[in-house]
Amino acid sequence: MMEGAVDQADRLDRRQAGALVRRLVPMLRPYRRETVRAIALVVLSTVAALAMPWFVKYGIDEGIVKRDKAVLFRAVLANIVTAVLAYVVSRRLIMNLSRAGEGLLRDLRNRVFRHLTGLSMTFFDRSKAGVLVSRMTSDVDSLAELVQFGLIQLISNILLLAFSMVALALVSWQLLLVCLVALPFVVGASVKFQRDANRAYLHVRDAIASTLSRLQEGIAGVRVIQAFAREEEQVRRFRTDSEHLLEAHMRSVWVQSWYLPVIELAGFGTTAVAIGVGGWMAIQGSIPVGSIVFFVLTLNNLFEPVNQLSQLFNTVQSAGAGLRKLFGLLDTGSDVPERPGAVDLPVGGVLAVDAVTFAYGASDGADAEGDPGGEGPIVLDGVSVEVAPGEKLALVGPTGAGKSTLAKLMARFYDPRSGSVTFGGVDLRDATLSSLRDRIVVIPQEGFLFAGSIRENVRIARPGASDAEVDDALRAVGAYERFAALAEGLDTPVRERGARLSAGERQLVSLARAALVDPAVLVLDEATSSLDPGTEHAVELALARLMEGRTVVVIAHRLSTSERADRVGVVADGQLVELGSHRELVAAGGRYAALFAAWSGHHDPAAVPAST
Amino acid sequence: MPDDPRRAGWSLVRRELRAQRGGVLIGVVVGLLWTVARVAMPKLVQRAIDDGITARDTGALLRWSLAVGGAATVAALFTGMRRFWAFKVSREMEASLREQLFGHIVALHAAFSDRSSTGDLMSRANADLLQIQNLVVLIPLTISNGVTVLAIAGIMVATDPVLTALAVGSLPVLNIVARRFGQRLHPASLAIQQESADLATVVEETVGGIRVVKGLGAEGVQQARLATEADQLYDASMAAARVRARFLPGMDLLPSVGVVGVLAYGGLQVIDGSLSLGQLVAFNVYIGLMIWPLRMLGMIIAQAQRAGASAQRVQEVLATPAAIVDPPAPRALPARGSGTGHVVFRDVTFAYHDDGPPVLDRFDLELAPGESVALVGPTGSGKSTVARLLLRFYDVDGGEVTLDGVDIRDLRLGELRRAVSIVFEDTFLFSDTIAANIAFGRPDADDDAIRRAAFLAGAHEFIEALPDGYDTPVGERGFALSGGQRQRIAIARAILADPRVLVLDDATSAVDPTKEHEIRDALAEVMHRRTTLIIAHRPATIALADRVVLLDGGHIVASGRHDELLASNARYREVLAAVHRPGEPAVGERADEEVVAP
């Protein structure tokens, strides 16, 4: 059973479908030869499928009935040739079509992914990760299903239907007309079937999703269920879901169960008509017996394709819907593109933020703070600050005040609405992206690892780095011995999302990456939650070594960090309200002084939120 | 352990089929009726040609073509019915097995879930059941197909044995080819699935780690990785295409051999007059009728092999006996009063594995009614084990655990677990509203009770601020809450259950240090006059307890008030210091005070 289903909103009208095809055709250009060949082969194989019963008819009418053995043998020979030809053609066809289709899919995957990774942070901020992943998985997969199974069937069924119609008309158009009385019923039933089946599959899809998620919860949450002795209740709820799924399945089976008989009745019923009416015509002498045999053997070619096509309709629809979403993604432009004629950033210099104003863009509903259809609220309003080479600036302030945004603007994760961010006198917007990433490195709160070995995870920061350089980077943060001591050393796989390493060790890998890039500026988001005692100290040491001699901007969640910085900037309500050394700010008696006082002993919960 | 796991798998399928035997029987009967109509049709076509057309008898022609029409109607009717019943039986069996699996999994002891991964159990309850369903749906079809093949072969042999040999001689090969096709295609499809999953992993981690990718300018690296995966997926897909190219055209070719043979030999027979034209046509139609049944007979063998392996994996779970069950003659807890909530661990020894080192070794601990005790110890000292033994997630290897004087093994599990509530470190919330999650242990609780519990847990304020308040959906598919918020909901859940004994297993670890004071008051309120076992790292939480117990090496090494132990016990200071940051203001004498900005 084909279970492709599309939501009403995803249905394509003719104009949209046409637009999709027009965009898809150029993507087939690298596979022009394969595509042209495949089309030719489909035509050939359809002709072959029809030629066989025609040669049988020829053998009967001209050979058997006329008692001409030579003609009979000619018909037999023609059939053998046709069968062998059909075999060869269909082998070639499968390979050709697969090469073109799979090649297209591969290109599409690469192209979409390349485009996706090139999009700006604003895009990722407002899109849900799951939706983006599904573009590259389920949307491409719905196309793949069409390519792998549907396309051959789609084309050959259309051709078979058309050619059969022509062939039957040539043999006896009168008899064909009689048989076509079944066609309106078949078409009507197919339209209804297609609609019902789609609705039924959508139900099945939803029911599967909710049953599986209940199942997953039951398994993952078994401790809680047992701890509260809720087993019976959970089993009862699961049974309800499971029964819903069963009902949904049965509904979709029911749709198939009434539709198939209609098709089969059309095929066999018209066979009866062909024999009855055709036989009468043969007795009258207006058609030869062989023509009736041809009809008996070919009538199924008329109705079976209609069946196949209506089963395929949903596959085609969902592939089209997937393709449209993919093109939609490809049409999303990057907010922080590289300017033509961009220059490399100088190796060092002052990092200067000048009168920067920033607001997050209009959201598409995925963003909680968004204001649909308009611009988001102002996050930063006229902020200016200069960080001298080698200086350490700590940013503190309540959650949502804009300190993270300010730090991200310094690394050009976003571009300011007005004002500018410069490094060594060059506006970041005029710099090449590669030099930007070489000079300014962002270290996020949590060490994020990719599947692969520890070595590969460090090397991701500079793909050309040699093993020795990776080792040196690990040594620079004092983590080399720790990882080299593992059974497989630096080649130890870290599994999905780094599950095998502790949070502290993941952070060490992340710091080693920065060391490998050897940037002039570090933008550091300090972790809020505490690390495991075993690695906490190692991470602190690594950070200290990494920060040495570099310009550092740190989003501080601990006042012990800001205490150690050269200067502290307090961000509140989108503005830099205080800026100065720890000592100066404490002496000034402003917000920072209040925060610090709360921390250093005078317990006052109201003043606590130094962080998060 | 069953003697033969493979046979155990099949016995499971047999048992389920027996439960569905009514449906299976209807499916088979309907299928056979379909067969009769289907097999009769070519015969009727033949009579129409021979008795009607060739004999120029219009009356006979009309009779026979009406008969063809009748057979067509019957066949069409039954084709729908046999499909319906085949699916009905298989889907009902799938649902029944799914429900059995779920019921069994939630009843199985904790040691079982420790051993098995969620993904593995999910695949047994999903992919494996689908394999079984795919086999069962073929059963009624296969039986009627087998009969179809035999009946057609019989009719053909009766007409002309030599022609039969020519017509169907190649068809058994079709059966073999179809079987081999299924066997080859399956691993190729699995390889495609695997490569797709690998590709999805690259996409997922790139999107999940986009800050790292962007921060390091590693877009190119990830693009190269994706290109590699896309190439591997392409190769796997082409390998599957090669399998299809090798087998499918051959499966189409084989029946043609019969058609050609029949035309050549049969044509000569008709010319010689020993065979009628109608019989020749009927032979051709019969060949067409045998193609699908034979292909399917080939496929069902390959499917049976896969389903057998799946049934075995399902049976493995169902055959695992639940180790922790209600006692045959349960005792009841004494009625609740001011003196209840008395917990005693007496001489308890426990190891997670039979041959492993004991985690608890002759462990003794008594919690007086209403007393709160904090359990402190280094990682791996067995703190959480104590909590799990009290809830009877595991049974002790030696000694006993009693609640209000009753050995917990003599209590019904439900009664024990209603009397003892736990808040886990890793908070699990169900895909439901916040209110339903809080009321998880007491579904009949009214809104006021839920709000009171949330208020006590320090959760009321943030819940009210959510878009739908208490009706906000959470869990996997719901609103994303922070770790601290989830823990507070879990605490509310335990509070609402109003247990005799409350266990907090590192339940405040994810609460933001700056918010901890909010729930500290809540905890103090909940613990008031309620027996509480606290497992914690944070001095502020530990200090809430009446008494602190230091656990090391499987037994208690020190016991006393928090400040006494701090002053007198070096090991205690060491254990607490390991959890705290060097260079931070020491916990010291202000230990019960909040650590403001750690």
Image (spheres, coloured by chain):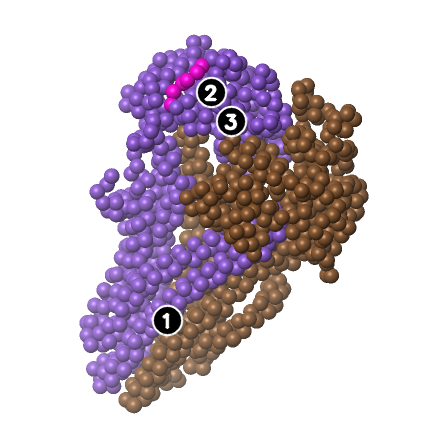
Query: Split into 4 quadrants, where in the image is the C terminus of chain B?
Result: top right
Q: Nearer the viewer, mark 1 or mark 2?
A: 2
Chain hosting mark 3? B
Depth order, front residue of B244/A458:
A458
Q: Secondary structure at mark 3?
A: helix
Number of other residues with Cα within 10 Å of mark 1, as a class: few under 14, some 14 to 19, many 20 or more: many
Secondary structure under tag 2 reads helix
Q: Name the residue: 44% across, 72% down.
A: A93
Chain B is which colour?
Answer: purple
Q: Where is the N terminus of chain B found, in terms of image quarters?
A: top left
Identify the subunit bearing mark 2.
B
Write the residue at 48% across / 18% down: B570
Mark 2, Cα crowd under 10 Å, few <14 / some 14-19 / many 20+, is some
Q: Amino acid at mark 1?
A: Pro
Q: Is residue B383 above or below residue B286?
A: above
For marks 3 and 1 on the same chain, the one whose residue lies earlier in the sequence = 1
Between B424 and A342, the one lying in front of the other is: A342
Which residue corresponds to mark 2? Answer: B571
Is residue B551 shown left or right of residue A25?
left
| Percent position of residue A367, x then y | 65, 43
- In the image, A578 versus B50, the foreground residue is A578
What colour do you see for chain A? brown
The label shown at residue B578 is 3
B11 vs B87, left or right, is left
